[in-house]
Amino acid sequence: MKLSGFLNLRGISGQIAALVIVSIAALHLIITASFWLQRPDQPDPSSDRGHAQLASAVQLLGAAPAAERPRLTAHVARAFPQLGIQILPPGPTPEAREPDGFNLRGLQRRLGQDYRIFGLANDGETRRLGIIMPDGMMISANILPDQRRPPPFMGGPWMMTLLFAVISVTLLGLWAARALAAPLSSFAKAAESFSLNGAAAPLPERGPEEIRSVARALNRMRQRITGLIDDRTKMLAAISHDLRTPITRMRLRCEFIEDETHRSRMLGDLDQMRAMLESVLSFLRNDRRLESMTLADVASTLQLITDQFGDMGRKVAYDGPAHAMATVRPDDLHRGVTNLVENAVRFGAEAIIRLRVTGEHLTIDVEDDGPGISDAQKQNVLEPFVRGDYARNMDEATGFGLGLSIANAIVLAHGGTLSLHDRAPHGLVVRIRLPVHQQSLAA
């Protein structure tokens, strides 16, 4: 990767590099500010343990005349009773040494080299030391250990700085990850809502340069796909229009055929050709025209289909609840189930439409007592222009292999599934599974 591309802030690599640099700089500033505020290199006045008071009192006594020292000692004892300052009787000068377990270097620095410190015997829990003044006078005082207690682990400046830095870097990382992943999420949503009828908005071209390039490429691809579908539909519509004219002329010429048998056969072939053209155009138009979602009574739609086939003398029965509300496209659902029932009564003597509602889904079964479809053909017959084993020869009893394809497309547009199952002892069950509630959008 070139250095110019790596440092380009409009690209993903440049933004990640900028994020790392900003995070390191922010962490450095946080640690510097914390040390400036805490100043761990400076002595803590709270750890003096009274040494400053003791040094001031001893220096005051050392500077006073010997006659005034008893009076000053009494005043200091009343002012600072915790020091316990007393004048020791004259005696041999002991060797200067620090008491065991104490660090009196700070007190020695405050007093100076003219004063000497030595340890005394402990009086119970109170530890005492002796101080020899420059003129040889000795006094005793209570001593507190000059030992710093380490700060608590969670409350020390190191831990607070580390926690603050970790939280800051984590928030920066989450923000950066969300900023980079948001365009990818919009790609997924746009792909889910992609349709050929132009209802979905184009992909937003925002984010890093790589994301914008992908968005532009996908938008151009959508335009090309839509253009190809439009061209295909227009071409087949033109072919259908051009073929209708010679078909009409042939029908007129057939009327002059004296042989009734030949005339009826030719008219049947022409009607079949016209039906084929209408079916193909209907299948193509279904890709572009989608009905809006609405709350409808699916049970009433299925009962209406049952009555329509009953009026035509077909044996079709309905088994299910009297009412079942769901968010569907009523006309498309009516058309899809009608295609399934037409196949059922074409290859069987009777058909049954069953409806079951369970939780957030409803199931529609269209059963027939026909020959069924072999397992090897169950997946293939859902493709356009593919017919089953018992419909290889095109005649009045067979279709063009579009009924199941149209029904499957309608079910997929509803966000559902269509599957084929065997019926005992023979026959076929076409099962549709649809969600009861869904958004009112063109999928």
Image (cartoon, helix red, strand yellow):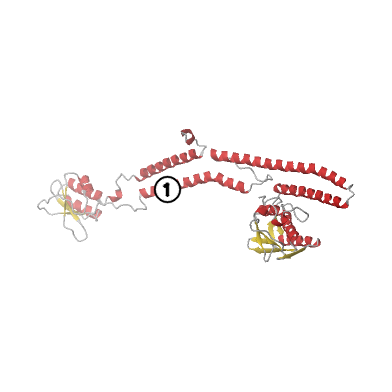
Question: What residue is drawn where x is 48% and y is 38%?
Answer: 14
Numbered disc 1: secondary structure = helix
Task: Give the quadrant of residue 343.
Answer: bottom right
Question: What residue is drawn where x is 47% and y is 47%?
Answer: 171
Position of residue 143 in the picture relative to residue 273 (left or right): left
Question: What residue is drawn where x is 60% and y is 48%?
Answer: 189
* Percent position of residue 108, x then y: 20, 47
- Give the residue type that dot 1 points to: Val
Q: Nearer the viewer, residue 73 or 110?
A: 110
Q: Residues within 10 Å of mark 1 (few under 14, many from 20)?
A: few
Task: Give the quadrant of residue 320.
Answer: bottom right
* Percent position of residue 376, x then y: 64, 56
Instruction: Determine whether 357 is above or below 194 in the image.
Output: below
Q: How many marks?
A: 1
Q: Nearer the viewer, residue 433 or 110?
A: 433
Q: Nearer the viewer, residue 258 or 70?
A: 258
Question: What residue is drawn where x is 70% and y is 64%?
Answer: 354
* Percent position of residue 164, x then y: 42, 48
- Does the rendering let one see residue 75? no
Residue where numbered disc 1 is placed: 166
Q: Nearer the viewer, residue 95 or 61?
A: 95
